[in-house]
Image (cartoon, rainbow, N blue to C red):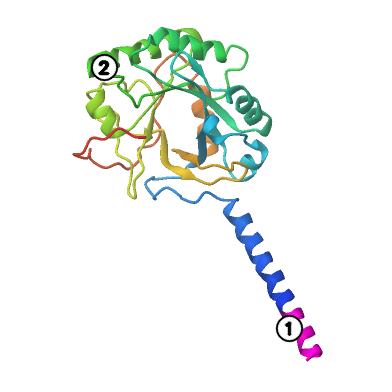
Amino acid sequence: MRRKQRWSIVVVGVLAACGAIIALDRLWRDDSEPTTAPPDCVEGPTTRGIDVSYYQDSIQWRRVKQSGVQFAFIRVSDGPTFTDPMFTKNWSGAARAGVMRGAYQYFRPASNAIAQADLVIAALAKDRGELPPVIDVETTDGKSATYIAQQIRAWVARIRDKLGVEPIVYSGPEFWRDAVAGADLTTQPLWIAHYTTGCPTVPLHWKMWTFWQHGDRGKVRGIERPVDLDVFAGTFADLQDFARRSRITTKIASPSPRKSEPSPPAAQPPD
């Protein structure tokens, strides 16, 4: 009996060790790659990126870079009064890790557009990052489409005038169509937010997207909480070229066309 018990203990120990190794391997794998990937909607390669705010808590940027993420949009504020408490830490951490950076602001149409733009300008006074600033348009604050479009244009003009770059517009296809009445801002690169199993819908007037946020529950090494997943329409060299050309205060040349679908009938703003 004792001999059998010893063998039983040995077998149980071996099985437990194997189970632990498998679990650790799965954990490492799950922590190494995003849980979702965008559909094959492009005519060429894409470059991986993310966008973050204080919701992601502390980020290990070197591990993020090692996972294959090449760029990040980092929230500077929600409107003119709430500065993201993790912006400074994320901005410097991403820079040290070699991740290309762009600042984005959650835009509040009910607040003064110039004051909001000036907050972004002040935040980038000493370090502008590599990518243009982004106006994140996904709430109406009860304002009309005409008023929202005017506010967006005022924000864009202020950033262009003070920073000498063409800022990026972020929005969802249905929201832009219904809440902004499909306003024509095609002078600005489009960052489309569309979580779909197919290709993203490009809003009226734009012919293509430059950046695509294709998921909001991604898992990336170095970030414990779910994170938004993005791609750039081109190679990393194309992204670097885009960053260089964005510094010129003329219309940015368009990237290669990306597949899109017609506008859907339903209208719901993105989360």
State yes or no: residue 56 in magenta: no
The image shows residue 150 at horizontal and vertical percentages of 29, 12
> Which three-letter amino acid code belongs to the residue tagged 2?
Lys
Instruction: Measure how far apart labels 1 and 2 are at the Cα level.
Output: 72 Å
Q: In this view, does 250 lie above or below 31?
A: above
> Which three-letter amino acid code belongs to the residue tagged 1?
Ser
- Which quarter of the picture shows residue 112? top left
Assign the C terminus to one quadrant of the image.
top left
Q: In this view, does 68 lie to the left or right of 201?
A: right
The one nearer the camera, 133 or 123, is 123
The image shows residue 76 at horizontal and vertical percentages of 52, 21
Most common secondary structure along the magenta stretch? helix
Assign the N terminus to one quadrant of the image.
bottom right
- Find out whether the residues at labels 1 and 2 contact each other: C-beta distance under 8 Å: no
Instruction: Please rate how many residues cluster around mark 2, counting C-alpha atoms within 10 Å: few if below 14, some from 14 to 19, many from 20.
Output: some
Which region shows up in magenta?
1-11
Identity of the residue furthest to the front in this view: 1
The image shows residue 257 at horizontal and vertical percentages of 35, 37
Give the residue drawn at x 68%, y 65%: 20
Earlier sequence position, callout 1 versus callout 2: 1
Which disc number belongs to residue 143?
2
Which disc number belongs to residue 8?
1
Tell me the mark number nearer the camera, choosing from 1 and 2.
Answer: 1
Report how many numbered discs are placed on residues in the image. Answer: 2
Instruction: Please rate how many residues cluster around mark 1, counting C-alpha atoms within 10 Å: few if below 14, some from 14 to 19, many from 20.
Output: few
Identity of the residue furthest to the left in this view: 265
The one nearer the camera, 142 or 249, is 142
The one nearer the camera, 33 or 252, is 33
The one nearer the camera, 58 or 6, is 6
